[in-house]
């Protein structure tokens, strides 16, 4: 993972130092629908998606006509609702019901833009690496079908397992692929959709969990090179 980050940084420095066109800065933020992909025969609990958010910045680096490199840095909240509660309503049981993972994410997208009357349409894809700066999970106790207590606990990434009562061992690092499409308007505003496909197993125990999310962001690009 450190090698990937260093490689992205070296690529960025090379492109900037060799680019004679104007490099512009963009900011964006918006809605994220986050979840976890669980294999069909996994022992992991059932999951459902959460409504989350992200905010970040990126560079827009011209490579050739219509082609751009867009490395960025984002603060993004991911995770999922978990189903570790017993299905038997008459029993007293407790379990983790929500996982929240806050990441510093570094995407590097290769983007192609097509001019239109109101601005530019864009589509792109590339890798990302992410580091979880904080993780939390919610614990609930259920008795006779009703909740009797609940609370939030911080994930200790040095412990194994690190989510009480589950055997899960969540790790900090994540990496995968990022896909984007959207529009840059002539008024400098941007509207983009994103899809993140995590490739790393987040759980170092017997489970196999991968981050998945889609989102919509509104942003602003400064000093676009053709204006």
Image (cartoon, helix red, strand yellow):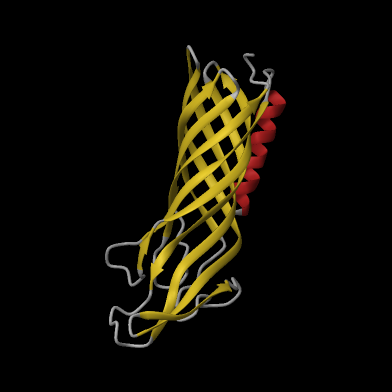
Rendered-image quadrant of the N terminus? bottom right
Q: With respect to residue 123, does 208 lie above or below?
A: below
Rendered-image quadrant of the C terminus? top right
Whether residue 226 is visible to the viewer of this picture, yes or no, is yes
Residue occupying image coordinates x 56% and y 42%:
107
**Image quadrant of residue 95?**
bottom left
Q: Is residue 84 left or right of residue 22?
A: left
Question: x, y (%) of residue 106?
Answer: 59, 45
Whether residue 198 is visible to the viewer of this picture, yes or no, is no
Front-lying residue, 175 or 194: 194
Question: x, y (%) of residue 208?
Answer: 39, 64
Residue occupying image coordinates x 38% and y 75%:
84
**Image quadrant of residue 17?**
top right
Q: Is residue 213 left or right of residue 133?
A: left
Q: Residue furthest top?
A: 117
Q: With respect to residue 112, does 108 lie above or below?
A: below
Count of numbered tags: 0
Question: x, y (%) of residue 209?
Answer: 41, 62
Question: x, y (%) of residue 40?
Answer: 27, 63
Q: Residue furthest bottom?
A: 91
Q: With respect to residue 210, does 204 lie above or below?
A: below
Q: Is residue 174 left or right of residue 27?
A: left
Front-lying residue, 1 or 76: 76
Residue occupying image coordinates x 32% and y 88%:
91
């Amino acid at each position: 993972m450190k090698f990937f980050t260093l490689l992205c940084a070296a690529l960025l420095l090379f492109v900037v130092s060799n680019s004679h066109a104007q490099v512009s800065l963009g900011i964006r933020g918006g809605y994220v629908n986050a979840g976890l992909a669980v294999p069909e025969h996994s022992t992991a609990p059932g999951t459902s998606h959460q409504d989350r958010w992200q905010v970040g910045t990126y560079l827009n680096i011209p490579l050739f006509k219509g082609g751009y490199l867009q490395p960025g840095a984002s603060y993004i909240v991911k995770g999922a609702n978990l189903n570790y509660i017993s299905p038997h309503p008459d029993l007293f049981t407790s379990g983790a019901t929500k996982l929240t993972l806050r990441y510093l994410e570094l995407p590097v997208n290769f983007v192609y833009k097509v001019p239109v009357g109101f601005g530019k349409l864009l589509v792109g894809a590339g890798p990302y690496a992410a580091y979880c700066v904080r993780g939390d999970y919610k614990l609930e106790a259920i008795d006779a079908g009703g909740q009797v207590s609940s609370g939030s606990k911080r994930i200790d990434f040095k412990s194994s397992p690190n989510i009480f009562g589950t055997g899960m061992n969540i790790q900090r690092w994540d990496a995968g692929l990022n896909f984007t499409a959207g529009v840059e308007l002539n008024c400098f505003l941007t509207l983009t959709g994103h899809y993140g496909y995590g490739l790393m197993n987040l759980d170092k125990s017997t489970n196999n969990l991968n981050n998945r999310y889609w989102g919509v962001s509104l942003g602003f690009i400064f000093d676009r090179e053709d204006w």
